[in-house]
Amino acid sequence: MNLTVPPLPDVAAGREPEPSQGKPYRALQRVGMQGIATRLQWADGARLPATADVSVDLATGQRGIHMSRLYRLLDRLDESPVTPERLDALGHALLDSQQDTSQRLYLALRFALPLRRRALLSDASGWRHYPLTLTLEGSHEGLTQTLTLELDYSSTCPCSTALARHAMSRDWRHWAEEQNTETLDAEAVAEWIEHSGSFPTPHSQRSRAVIALRLTADAAYAPEARLDAFEQTLQTPVQTLVKRVDEQAFAERNGANLMFCEDAARRLAAQCEAQAGVAGYRVDITHAESLHAHDAVARAERDFEVR
């Protein structure tokens, strides 16, 4: 005996009044999923692990959205390289999957870009994994893409450097007063500096920049080139494998590039202004203070309002 199974009810599409309210379901600004485990294909063909957050709005009278449709579309991210054009097309497909229930979309793809980094002077090198986020938001009338890059660097405090120099000059004067000025030549001074001097050191800290670039419609992502430019602007990106000559070069770079968090924010904002395809930006700086138990922070932004 053959039994015909009737179609299963679509509970989420129900339009009946809310049980306790006696009136249609109210509209919601965001409904969706976050932390979806997925992977995407990058420009070089590599398939990178990623997590996705996706949500849409929900019209009045609709009980819920079709989450499985969003999931299936995101599950195809590794089939071809992610480009601005493909991400825009994905956004429209995500909205279309909800039919008339949704008009606005928010999508965030988080992953790490592996880049091989050489040491400053030697032949040493190692891998860095740079956190990236691609964000897509808006409606069928227009979807805005944002590329967010995170990078770590070292920052040396100008105030502590000035204090260290003051203490070194004080100790030098005390030592010089005790010496026979007739034998006090450059070699004697160098000998004292290298073997006898006691030097207070300026305090440095590992610091982080989070740079969100609101991209124009024709912009390329080009994260490697953008990261290179930002690190060159700061001069002191953290290193991978180093030898002693690299470590000394890194110390010298820190000493030559003294930065408050305000300085770092201004430098990177100027670099954002110079980059192609940037319609707006937000730069967030964190200096994890080695002197204090709190962080120093700064922000610079231009034309970054969410529309």
Image (cartoon, rainbow, N blue to C red):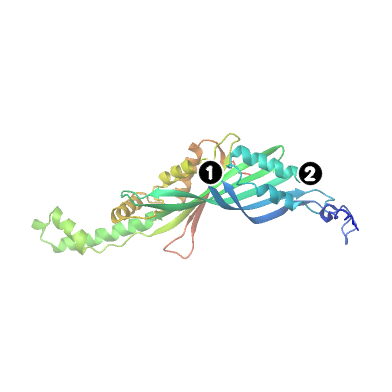
Q: Which residue type does callout 1 highlight?
A: Gly
Q: Nearer the viewer, residue 188 or 4?
A: 4
Query: Is 158 rendered above or below residue 200?
Result: above
Q: Position of residue 63 (x, y in %)?
A: 82, 54
**SS category of the residue bearing label 2:** loop
Please rate how many residues cluster around mark 1, counting C-alpha atoms within 10 Å: few if below 14, some from 14 to 19, many from 20.
few
Residue 99 bears which disc, if any?
Answer: 2
Screen quadrant of the N terminus: bottom right
Q: Residue at x 20, y 62 (%)?
A: 195
| Element at label 1 | loop
* Residue lying farthest to the front in this orientation: 1
Q: Which percent across, then down, holds residue 95?
A: 73, 44
Query: Can residue 302 be spotted in the picture?
Result: no
The answer for how far apart the CA atoms under marks 2 and 1 are is: 33 Å
Label total for image: 2
Q: Amino acid at mark 2?
A: Gln
In which quadrant is the C terminus drawn?
A: top right
Mark 2 Cα shell of 10 Å, populated few (<14), some (14-19), many (≥20): few
In the figure, is residue 306 to the left or right of 165? right
Camera-nearest residue between 188 and 10 = 10
**Of marks 2 and 1, the one in the foreground:** 1
Q: Position of residue 19 (x, y in %)?
A: 88, 61
Residue found 77% across the figure and 46% down from its top: 98
Examine the image and state in which quarter residue 143 appears. Answer: top right
Q: Is residue 135 visible?
A: yes
Q: Is 92 placed left or right of 272 in the picture?
A: right
Give me the disc on residue 281: none
Upstream in sequence: badge 2 or badge 1: 1
Q: Which one is in front, 260 or 244?
A: 244
Residue, disc 1: 45
